Image (cartoon, helix red, strand yellow):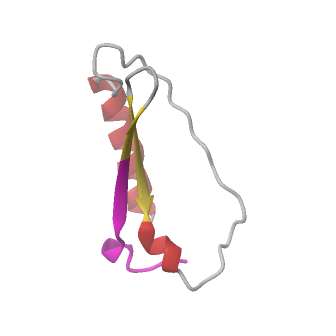
């Protein structure tokens, strides 16, 4: 179990895709220096499809609210 996650550091990477849309990634760089073994040797990948044509490739308001809700529920578990 990880503790003191409020002191983690994050890096945000941004790139532009061939179609012109933005690709944004947030990486918890604090985990790169973690001195413990992972309790689960797998990765969960979640895809949430949305139409970003009218918002520079970014989520619309409804999708953004859903993402915020997911993040909020996850942060309450740690």
Residue 51 location (% of width, % of height) = 41, 16
Q: Residue at x 28, y 20 (%)?
A: 55
Relative side of 2 to 37, left or right: left
Quarter of the image holding residue 62?
top left
Q: Nearer the viewer, residue 1 or 57?
A: 57
Q: Is residue 36 above or below residue 27?
A: below
Q: Is residue 73 above or below residue 61?
A: below
**Residues drawn in magenta:** 1-13
Relative side of 8 to 43, left or right: left
Residue 54 location (% of width, % of height) = 29, 13
Q: Residue at x 39, y 39 (%)?
A: 15
Work out which quarter of the rendered image holds the N terminus and state it: bottom right
Within the magenta stretch, is there residue 41? no
Work out which residue is located at the far front of the displayed protein and give it.
Answer: 18
Within the magenta stretch, is there residue 12? yes
Quarter of the image holding residue 35?
bottom right
Q: Is residue 7 above or below residue 15?
A: below
Work out which quarter of the rendered image holds the C terminus and state it: bottom left
Residue 22 location (% of width, % of height) = 37, 32
Quarter of the image holding residue 16?
top left
Q: Nearer the viewer, residue 21 or 66?
A: 21
């Amino acid at each position: 179990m990880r503790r003191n996650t409020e002191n983690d550091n994050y890096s945000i990477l941004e790139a532009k895709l061939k179609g012109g849309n933005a690709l944004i990634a947030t990486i918890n760089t604090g985990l790169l220096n973690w001195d413990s073994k992972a309790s689960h040797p797998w990765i969960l990948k979640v895809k949430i499809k949305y139409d970003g044509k009218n918002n520079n490739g970014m989520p619309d308001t409804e999708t953004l609210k859903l993402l915020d809700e997911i993040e909020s529920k996850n942060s309450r578990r740690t």
